Image: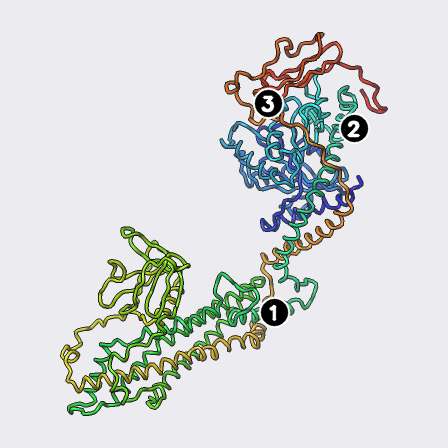
Amino acid sequence: MGNRGMEDLIPLINKLQDAFSSIGQSCNLDLPQIAVVGGQSAGKSSVLENFVGRLDFLPRGSGIVTRRPLILQLVNNKAEYAEFLHCKGRKFVDFEEVRQEIEAETDRLTGSNKGISPIPINLRVYSPNVLNLTLIDLPGMTKVAVGDQPPDIEHQIRDMLLQFITKESCLILAVTPANMDLANSDALKIAKEVDPQGLRTIGVITKLDLMDEGTDAQDILENKLLPLRRGYIGVVNRSQKDIDGKKDIRAAMAAERKFFLSHPAYRHIAERMGTPHLQKTLNQQLTNHIRDTLPGLRSKLQSQLLSLEKEVEEYKNFRPDDPARKTKALLQMVQQFGVDFEKCIEGSGDQVDTSNLSGGAKINRIFHERFPFELVKMEFDEKELRKEISYAIKNIHGVRTGLFTPDLAFEAIVKKQIIKLKEPCLKCIDLVIQELINTVRQCTNKLGSYPRLRDETERIVTTYVREREGKTKDQVLLLIDIELSYINTNHEDFIGFANAQQRTAANVTKKRVMPNQVIRRGWLTINISIMKGGSKDYWFVLTAESLSWYKDEEEKEKKYMLPLDNLKLRDVEKGFMSSKHVFAIFNTEQRNVYKDLRQIELACDSQEDVDSWKASFLRAGVYPEKDQPENDDAMNPTDTLSMDPQLERQVETIRNLVDSYIGIVNKSIRDLMPKTIMHLMINSAKDFIHSELLAYLYSAGDQGSLMEESAEQAQRRDEMLRMYHALKEALVIIGDISTTTISTPVPPPVDDTWIAKDPSPPPASRPASAFVPPPSRPPAVRGPTPGPPPPLSTSPAFGVPPVPSRPPPGQTAYAADPNSGGVPLIPSRPARVPPALPPGIPR
């Protein structure tokens, strides 16, 4: 056909189809195919069997026989056999077994209740008697559910057909029997819906040998009557008698050839009729259609190849025939794991995750937001602290009345407060440990190709991190013990006794940052009951002096401004039906905070956001609420409420000294904690991964078993590599074909408005002006017709021109379908004396 490049492409399209089916929807491309559509018993299966040249390899019976799409790939080959995609490696030589396998595979998904499924069965037939084609046999269209068929079977079948034929890359083979009203063909109607220009629709007329005597379909096959853009091709299939008698396909093809050559209406077009010509035409149309879709197909293949390259990258160093491949793979995997772990901790500019925080970013938040918040939560309870100082002074003086402020009381109180730092410091280490382990797990997920390697790597590194956890905690506790061992009252930031005596409680208030400095901006939800307006989202701005909220980020419409004086934070339990995390702000003097509310509840999407906002409030001087002591009876009111002036001055002095010194210790701990954790835990873990992990893996067991792939991963790798190479091969062939192949032009448009849009409305619904046959031309009447032929007219009911009469000299005949409402069908022709047949063709 002069289209050799395309002939090479069709098998490759079949190869791609197999690869796509096995790899899943992620590689779905609309590859060029031919879908066979038609009503039940229209002869679709017989047409396909004629293509293959085999008897009854497709299921037959009454009702819906084809209940799953059958993708039939015909490949020209010297040997003759069949293969199913779901039976890899098995070749079917007996085509009776092919039919049985189709039936079994259909029942496996749909059962025996005549249900249908859109999941296709892939069948490839190799034969020297076929041309390269890819066809899809679809269930026949029906109107009424019969037997066990579901009530909505018509809609199910229609939806399935549309799933295939709506694709622009799908050619439509519309099969219609010659003994039915072509204007109401279901196949042509549904084809017209998805292909209004007729570019993808090819008409096939079957059962030409079963037409009423004296009638023919010459005008239709010549595309003069009821035309299609790509025209019609007539075929003659085996009759039921031939099927029952197991008539050979070759004999059936010879009978079809004889029919067209001997029939007076078809002999002059016999070379353009029959199954062999239909095969050639479909092959040509498919190759031309593939060429028309090459630009789009090339673009999709290139896009698919780019997306696959990222996944195939990890397989590029995999060489099954390399004896040292497992060692190479192990070294590469361990090396990549170390790089990934370091990037997660230290940060990286390449492949930045914009949806989630990395392990390093989360650890940073623990160091600079969560840990300072935990320290501030240890802030002194003023009333309790003064009581403790008072008791310490009295116990140091004993029975004597002290004239001077005892420094031993200061030291005892300071040490007690320093000991309290152990809890937040250890909690900080626990939080960092958890993030480190999560980071290790995240990085080992990339080793999923080798399950045992992944598990061993995670176990070894996690065990090492746990070991470092103990050493880090010991070091942090040592830091606190060092602070306890010596109270340095000569520190440059310490206020000293002289300054402490001069300061008053008012001077000890916490320093805040610059009054106009904005500490944080962001969205928060104010939780309010539905009776008071319901919860709403606002844009909040926190400064050192106030908390304001606005309608949106533009900060033009301010809703409220709340001063921070006397405010504190309080935890609120998460609601049963709420997915948000909540905290509250309240006034310590029991005043309303917002409107008539004593506290306002602020909600965030995650606990991390809550902790971050709390840390921001700490910077603004808003601290968390303190738990009230449970045993208030232990406090003696006379000891706390009544003090002599001298004792009160001593308590105030020590209070100021403790506040100053604890501030120094907190500053030192906040600085040393991240350094200690980084040195003893995180940096040590990185060094271990880079220098010792490989040795631990070698000692963990046999290298061969360590590098064994999972069955799923091996299958995925093989399919991915096959897909990758198939795509590259397809792009190479497409590049060659696009410049060397010449396709035939598309036929010009035709007037196909004759195809009825509504499915055969009942007689009661037809308008009164519906077409009825003229009384002067009753159906099936022969005789002389006086005068010229009647002019063409249009039926107002269907918008379809009635069949024009083409009477030969002397007589005209009409054949009427009793179900067509009187619409004349195919005009009959007078009997002609058949011309002489070619030699070798019996009459």
Q: Which mark is residue 799?
A: 3
Question: Where is 728 relative to 176, above or below?
Answer: below
- For the N terminus, the image quarter is top right
| Residue sitting at the far right | 839
Check disc 3: other Cα within 10 Å, few if <14, some if 14-19, many if 20+: some
Query: For this view, does 390 lie left or right of residue 311?
Result: left
Q: What type is the residue that disc 1 sits on?
A: Gln
Q: What type is the residue that disc 2 sits on?
A: Glu
Q: What is the distance, in whole Å, between disc 1 and disc 3 at their CAs?
A: 78 Å
Mark 3 or mark 2, which is nearer the start of the sequence? 2
Q: Which residue is mark 1?
A: 703
Coordinates of residue 157 in the picture (x, y in percent): 56, 34
Q: Determine if residue 92 is in view.
A: no
| Badge count | 3
Check contact, mark 2 vs mark 3: CB within 8 A.
no
Question: Where is 577 relative to 147, above or below?
Answer: below
Please name which of the two marks, 2 or 1, marks the residue nearer to the observer. 2
Q: What type is the residue that disc 3 sits on?
A: Gly
Query: In the image shown, does 54 or 534 lie closer to the viewer?
Result: 534
Q: Which mark is residue 271?
A: 2
Coordinates of residue 285 in the picture (x, y in percent): 72, 37
Name the quadrant containing residue 215: top right
Question: Where is 566 relative to 810, above or below?
Answer: below
Q: Secondary structure at mark 1?
A: helix
Please name which of the two marks, 1 or 3, marks the residue nearer to the observer. 3
Query: In the image shown, does 147 or 774 lie closer to the viewer?
Result: 774
Check disc 1: other Cα within 10 Å, few if <14, some if 14-19, many if 20+: some
